[in-house]
Amino acid sequence: MTLAYLTTPLIGVVGTAVVGQFGDAALLGGLAAGAVAFDVVFTSFNFLRAGTTALVAQAVGRDDDAEQQAVFWRATVIAVVAGLLLMLAAPLTSLAGQWFMSAEPRVSETLDAYVRIRMLGAPFALVNYAVLGYVLGRGEGGFGLLLQATLNGVNIVLSILLGLELGWGVEGVAWAAVGGEVAGTFLGLAVLMRRFGRQPPLARAGIFDGKAFRRLFVLNRDIMIRSFALLAAFALFTRQGVQFGTATLAANAVLMNFFLVASFFLDGFATAAEQLAGRAIGARYEAAFRKAVRLCSVWGFAMAGVMALVLLAFGGSFVAMISTAEDVRAVAMAFLPWAAFTALSGVLAFQMDGVFIGAAWSRDMRNMMLLSLLVFVAALATLPVAFGNAGLWMSLHLFLIARGLSLLALLRPRARTAFHSGAAVH
């Protein structure tokens, strides 16, 4: 899954690089702002992936094949309905993004074009969340890699073809994303339909069971609030960058791609924690739970250290490759170390997120994310005023550290309750 997630930030890197070849900071800034507006909406729906993973993993731990399939179909129903509504609401999403960013007119125009096109792929994007959640809940990393490689590979190829070769720019990058989502949906559903066809028929009543749907909705509600708070933090980060000028906005967008590369690398271990913790909770097997937490955390910190060193060593070359604008390059190089060390400050947050998602302790995730967001807002109100763009990056580091430590503080009491409230398997 680390390999699978590594293909995702490459989309941002390639898209930014394609638009960066036009040498226009306003286009880069508009792409960054449009991506934030889109991600605020879609990451808020990431509960479809995370909630599905948690419930499928726990069903695997109980050896309940029918419930695994039922969880997938419940998530797919929600995905299709929500995706169609988001597609219809694209103009409102664009207007909200423009209002929030308060950027110059050309940046707003680019944002509008990007969001309106990307939202056409909303139903496919959300169905892909359900498919991937099911696959990850079963621990099928190879299948997950195939799905992500197909979705993101098509996206990257089309970004270069439409955005650069045909000169469509930001619009080409947006259409490429839609094409990738469609390809991923068709591949995922084709494989799952063949698999489900070999299993005993699932009664409709089993899919639309009221109690099971309520559990999914409660879990999804908490994860959605948590995801929205996370994206709100990154949106505030981007918006604050607007106040420092278009060159700084574009430079921060370049550097955030490096953070995303590191974060998706770490997400492989977080996903392993989701699946292993969820399976251990379903089987009520405490020893496996403790071992999963320990191994995923150790490897996560090791990987974070490696990523920080790689970004420090080769970040200058990456910046030069992505942007041709000299003012953007200069600002990005000045703040490269701040971006490089986000891997280390954020690794604990990734690992704890994985454990808490797999265990379905969604209320704790929600509450600690909201607490961390308050820490971030307080930092934004003070540090950028005193230290400029460096203060903005300081605030991001504090936010990441607060997320990890707050969840870590709750881990032991929650595990004690989960495994000792009744007879556990040993």
Image (cartoon, helix red, strand yellow):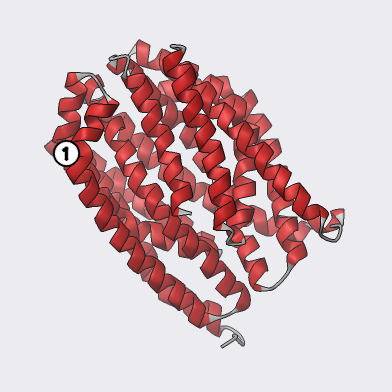
Query: In x, y percent, where is residue 16?
Result: 36, 26
Res. 156 in view: yes
Which residue is drawn at the image coordinates 27% and 49% (left, top)? 342
Which residue position holds label 1?
390
> In terms of depth relative to the viewer, which is nearer, 306 or 340?
306
The relative height of residue 66 versus residue 384 in the rendered view (above or below) is: below
Which residue is drawn at the image coordinates 48% and 62% (left, top)? 272
> In terms of depth relative to the viewer, which is nearer, 373 or 82?
82
The relative height of residue 190 versus residue 213 in the rendered view (above or below) is: above
Q: Secondary structure at mark 1?
A: helix
Query: In x, y percent, where is residue 201?
Result: 86, 57
The relative height of residue 296 versus residue 371 in the rendered view (above or below) is: below
Query: What quarter of the picture does the C terminus occupy?
Result: bottom right
Q: Which image quarter: residue 250?
A: top left
Which residue is drawn at the image coordinates 21% and 39% (left, top)? 315
Res. 388 in view: no
Q: Amino acid at mark 1?
A: Ala
